[in-house]
Amino acid sequence: MADHRTPVPGGRTVRDATLEVFRRLGLTTVFANPGSTEVPFLADLPGDIEFVLALHEGSVVGVATGWAIAHDRPALVNLHTTAGLGNAVGALATARVNRAPLVVLVGQQDRRHLALEPFLTGRLEGLAGDYPVWVTQPATARDVPGAVARAFHEAVAGRGPAIVVVPMDDWLQPMDEDNPTAAPVRVRRGSAVDPGTVTEVAELVAAASSPVLVVGAGADRADTWRALVAVAERLGAPVYQEAFGARAGFPQDHPRFAGHLPAGRARLRGVLAGHDLVLVVGAPVFRQYPYETGGYVDPGTRIVQVSDDAAEVHHSPADLAVVTDPAGFCAALAGELQQRPATGRPARSVASVPPPAPGEPLRAPHVYAELARRLPRDTVIVEETPSTRQVLETMVPTREPLGFLSAAMGGLGFGLPAAVGVRMAQPSRPVVAVLGDGSSLYGVQALWTAANYGVGTLFVVLANGGYAIMDRLAERHGDAKPPWPSFPEVRLSALAAAFGCPTRRVEGYTELVEVLDEVVPLLSGMDAPLLLDVTVQPEEHFNP
C-alpha cells in the first residue's frame, strides 16, 4: 500500500476523484483550519479550489454557515480530527438549527494503524451528537468520493451539516475506475402542492372572522414573501414575525406588518387575542424563551401551520400542520381566498429615539436610530447583541429577503463569522454585523479572515463592558448578586487591530454620526472590513 505522503505513480487517486466531485457539485471553496491529518488532502490544491482560512474552528463553521445561507447551497468545510470537530460542535449545532447545508470533511489518523489508537486518533462519529444530519466514515478509501457526493445530497435534504470522516492515507490511494459511486450524479426534489390541502386550509381561513398571520425564518425567500404579501392583502390581516426568528419572513415595511411576537405566553395570548385563526408560515408554533404557564392562544382559536421543515411540524401543537413548500402553497392559497376589507388596525410606526441630550450617554437605541436613517434597503443585518436584540428589531425593519440573520438557537459566536461569510457570498450587498462586545469574543478570530481576504463587512460593536443580558436576567431573581464581573477594559478595537482589521473607536454621538455619514455610503463597494467599537451605556430593561 502506498505511503500517505506519496501519490500513486501515474494513476488516478481517491483525491483526484473527490476533487472531480467537488467541481461537479460546486464545492470549490473550502473553509478550513487545517491540521496534520488534512495535509494529504490540502497540499498542492488545484488553482480552481479556493482555500479560506479561519483561525478557530468555530469561526470556520460560522463563516461557512453565512456563506451557505447567502448562497442557498452547501458550503465545504474541513476540520482537524477530534480537536477540530470538538471545537466546532457549537457552531455545527447553530448551522443545523439555522438550516444551513454544510459538507464537513473531518480528518482522521492513518487507516492502517487506527486499531492501535495512535496519536491524533479521533472517536469522531458521535462527537457532534445529534446535530449533524448524517455522519459516515467510508468503509474503504475508494468509497470517499461517493460519500462526499452523498453528504452533499444529505446536507441539502436535511438542511444541516453532513460529516464525512476521512483517514489521512485514503486520499492518495488508487481509485478503482470500475467501482460504482454510491450517490446519484443529480437529485431532483419535488415541490408540488396538494390542491386538496390548499382548499382545506382556504376553507378554514374563510370560516374565520379574524385571521392573523405569523411568519418566520422558513419564509425568508423572495417567492415566499410575494406569496405571503398576496395572502395578507387578500385577508386584510396583520402579519407578525416569530419571536427570536433567525430570519425575516415578511417585508417589515409593508402596511400589513404588525411587529414581532413576544417570547412569553401571557403576552403572546394578549397579542393574538381576538383572532380566531392563526396561520403560521415558516415558523414554529410558537418560539418561546422564559417558561410561563397557560396556553399559547385563547380557547377556540385554531392554528394552521405551513412549513417545509418536518421536524418543526412534528412537535407543533397546531390543529392542522402542512409539510410543503411555503411559497408554492401560499401562492395557491392566495388564489383561493376572497378579498376582505383591511382591518381597522393603524399601520405600524417604526420606533425611533431623538439624539441624546448634552451630557447624556450614548445608548444602543441611539445607534440603531442612526443606522435606520442611513442603511440601504438591501442591507443584510447580522445580529448578535443579546441585551438589545428586540430594540434593534423594532427600530431597523427588514425590507428585503436575507435582510436579517441571527443564530436560531441563541448560541454566541455566530454573528461575527457569519457576517464574513455572507459578504463573501454576496460581495456587492451591504453587510452590517451588529454585535455586543461580550458576544464578539466568541468568534473574534474571524476578523483576521475578513481582513486577510478583503471582506467588506461593517462590524458595529456595542461596548457596554459586560454581559448586560446576564445582569438583567439576574435582576429577575430579586436581590441575587451575580458572580460574574464586568470587563470594561476589553476593547474590540484593540483586538481588531491585532488581527489586522481596520477599526475606529466611537465614544459619543457626534463621532457616531460622523463615521456613519462617512462609511455607510461606501458599504456596497468596501473591499476591507471596518470595526466600529462604540461605547454605550447598558440598557436597564430586557423583556423579550
Image: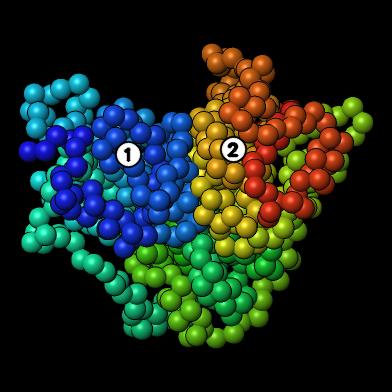
Q: Are marks 1 and 2 in contact (CB under 8 Å)?
A: no
Residue 303 percent across, percent down from the top left: 43, 64
| Residue drawn at point x = 48 percent, y = 79 percent | 331
Which quadrant holds residue 42?
top left
Q: Gap in Å between the C-alphas at discs 1 and 2?
A: 24 Å
Quarter of the image that includes the N terminus? top left
Task: Out of 317 and 172, give the one closest to the viewer.
Answer: 172
Which quadrant holds residue 157?
bottom left
Task: Out of 244 and 458, give the one closest to the viewer.
Answer: 458
Residue 154 percent across, percent down from the top left: 27, 56
> From the viewer's perspective, is residue 63 above or below residue 56?
below
> From the viewer's perspective, is residue 137 above or below residue 438?
below
Task: Out of 406 and 119, give the one closest to the viewer.
Answer: 119
Residue 29 percent across, percent down from the top left: 41, 50
Asked which secondary structure carries label 2, the reply is helix
Marks 1 and 2, the one that precedes in the sequence? 1
Q: Hey, what amino acid is under mark 2?
A: Ala
Left or right of residue 418, residue 435 in this image: right
Mark 1 crowd level (few <14, some 14–19, many ≥20, 10 Å Cα): few
Residue at far right of view:
358
Mark 2 crowd level (few <14, some 14–19, many ≥20, 10 Å Cα): many
| Residue drawn at point x = 58 percent, y = 21 percent | 478
Viewer can see residue 113: yes
Residue 150 percent across, percent down from the top left: 22, 57
Task: Out of 156 and 109, give the one closest to the viewer.
Answer: 109
Q: Hey, what amino acid is under mark 1?
A: Ala
Q: Which residue is mark 1?
A: 43
Viewer can see residue 351: no
Q: Which residue is mark 2?
A: 451
Give the tally of numbered discs: 2
> From the viewer's perspective, is residue 494 above or below residue 174?
above
